[in-house]
Amino acid sequence: MILYSKNTSGMKTALISVICLFSAMTLTAQTVIIDGVPRDTSFTLDGTYKKERKYRPYIEPVRTSLPEGVRAYEGVTYKTVSNPWGEHALKMNIYRPDDDKKYPVLLMIHGGGWNSGNPELQVPLAQQVAARGYVTIPVEYRLIPEALYPAGVEDLEDAITWIYKNAKRYGIDRKKIAVSGCSAGGQLAMLLGTQNKSGKIGAVINMDGISSFVTEESVGRAREARKKGTTLPVDAIWLGGTYEERPDNWKGASALFWIGRQSVPVCFINSSIPRFHNGRDEAIEQLHALGIYTEVHTFDDTPHTYWFFRPWFDDTVSYMADFLDKIFKGK
């Protein structure tokens, strides 16, 4: 069976067999069928906690808990797509203050290396930011092996369009739309906000997501795997091949190549692990040259997935809400 992904011209191009994609998962990956679609379920809160507590026994995972005064609409379908396994309804959860006022909105993109994860990973952050006076929307998008780049980006662009069209129903100020993401979700949020194709995005929060795939380390790692005949790194799989094979995808998925006057203010919230900041400093330099505001918060001695855990969770919520207050509420 061949996996297909639409390119920008709408033509279907065979990228890689599903069998090859399954074999490309790490040995610890757990692929199951959910809603008729193969999913890698290896990236979870509990699994991450089990790994990280060996090195930091003091950490505390943060669970879903709807705050008082916050209303929830869960499992809302924003788009249905076709794939080799059938139809897939892409869903989102919506959290907002439990009143009739209109609020800015934050679309929240989960991480998982473009092949794992789900919107539930963003729910604890979403619930707490909603309590600070925002509509927050953790969103589902297509992952490996269902689809490769740019399908997930297209899903998220469609989610923004859906939010804009349904703003009145959910009490959203559609003139104040922000996007956030963690890890791979941060890369996607940064890409959406720098491209800003719709012109509807007003701010980005990037939590440990790279701003460029085109680095010596990433390009070299994929090139070496191809040379040895071993499995490509997951970023190269998502991008459809090595840099030499798919340079347009590697550049097209890198926010650094899209920064312009259409780009928006960015809040970077980072761990202490440099490789998750690839392209950040160059992006800041380019944004500042255009007069576009940025701010950076870095946690010392943290795991990559700091947003899952206390003692960093509460500060992360504050950084997010304070930045949005500054951009959308003039505080």
Image (cartoon, rainbow, N blue to C red):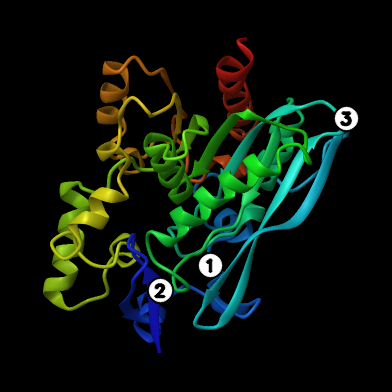
Marks 2 and 1, the one that precedes in the sequence: 2
Question: Which residue shows up at 37% across the image and 38% down it?
Answer: 195
* Image marks 3 and 2: residues in contact by CB distance under 8 Å: no
- Considering depth in this image, is 260 or 164 the residue closer to the camera? 164
Rendered position, 296 above or below 312: above
Q: Secondary structure at mark 3?
A: loop
Q: Is residue 180 left or right of residue 233?
A: right
User: Measured from the top left, where is residue 148 in percent x and y?
Assistant: 39, 66
User: Measured from the top left, where is residue 191 in percent x and y?
Assistant: 39, 42
Q: Quadrant where the N terminus lies? A: bottom left
Q: Which mark is residue 99?
A: 3
Question: Which residue shows up at 11% across the image and 72% down it?
Answer: 227
Q: Amino acid at mark 3?
A: Asp
Which residue is disc 1 drawn over?
42
Tell us which disc is closer to us: 3 or 1. Answer: 3
Marks 3 and 1, the one that precedes in the sequence: 1
Q: Amino acid at mark 1?
A: Ser
Q: Amino acid at mark 2?
A: Met
Q: Which mark is residue 161?
A: none
Q: CA gap, disc 3 to disc 2?
A: 45 Å
Q: In the rendered image, is residue 325 in sight?
A: yes
Q: Residue furthest top?
A: 331
Q: Residue furthest bottom?
A: 1
Disc 3 packing (10 Å; few <14; some 14–19; many ≥20): few
Rendered position, 105 above or below 223: above
User: Measured from the top left, where is residue 146 in percent x and y?
Assistant: 48, 73
Which residue is disc 2 drawn over?
25
Q: Is residue 58 left or right of residue 226?
A: right
Instruction: Answer with the quarter of the image where residue 287 lies.
Output: top left
Question: Which residue shows up at 35% across the image and 75% down it?
Answer: 24
Q: Secondary structure at mark 1?
A: loop
